Amino acid sequence: CQDVTDVSKFDSVVLRGEENIVIEFYSPMCGACQEFAPIYDELARLLQPIPHIQAVRFDVTEQDIPQSGIDVGFELQATPQLYLVQHK
């Protein structure tokens, strides 16, 4: 599972990438996120051999969701929160 750590990577991987993306917005301090982490890791592992889709993570304690993400409808109401971004 790839961590999206900055705005340019967020835009290039999540919004303008060629692959479909499952993105998890999470907080490492969140109990529900800690419980969900092994499940998401397993999902990421299962998606690896499938063409044109990948799982990524975005730590909301490190930075806010970029404005580009808000503009396309990413709205954080709780963590963990998942979105599917389809490019194909």
Image (cartoon, grey):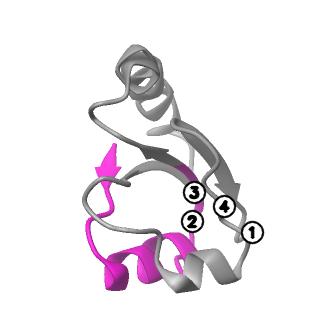
- Residue placed at 64% from the left, 47% from the top? 77
Relative height, residue 50 to residue 37 (above, below): below
Residue topped by disc 4: 75
Amino acid residing under circle 4: Glu
Of tags 2 and 3, the one toward the viewer is 3
Q: Classify mark 4: helix, strand or loop.
A: loop
Residue at figure coordinates x 51%, y 70% from the top left: 14
The amino acid type found where label 3 is placed reads Ile
**Start and end of the magenta stretch?**
1-23
Count the labels in the image: 4
The label nearer to you, 4 versus 1, is: 4
- Camera-near label (4 vs 3) is 4
Residue placed under numbered mark 1 in the picture: 88
The residue singled out by tag 3 in the image is 21
Which SS class for mark 3?
strand
- Cβ atoms under marks 1 and 2 closer than 8 Å: yes
Crowdedness near tag 2: few (<14), some (14–19) or many (≥20) residues, C-alpha within 10 Å: some
Question: Going from the N terminus, do you reach mark 2 or mark 4 first?
Answer: 2
Q: Which residue is mark 2?
A: 19
Residue 41, percent across and down? 38, 27
Query: Going 34% across and 85% down the picture, which residue do you hit?
Result: 8
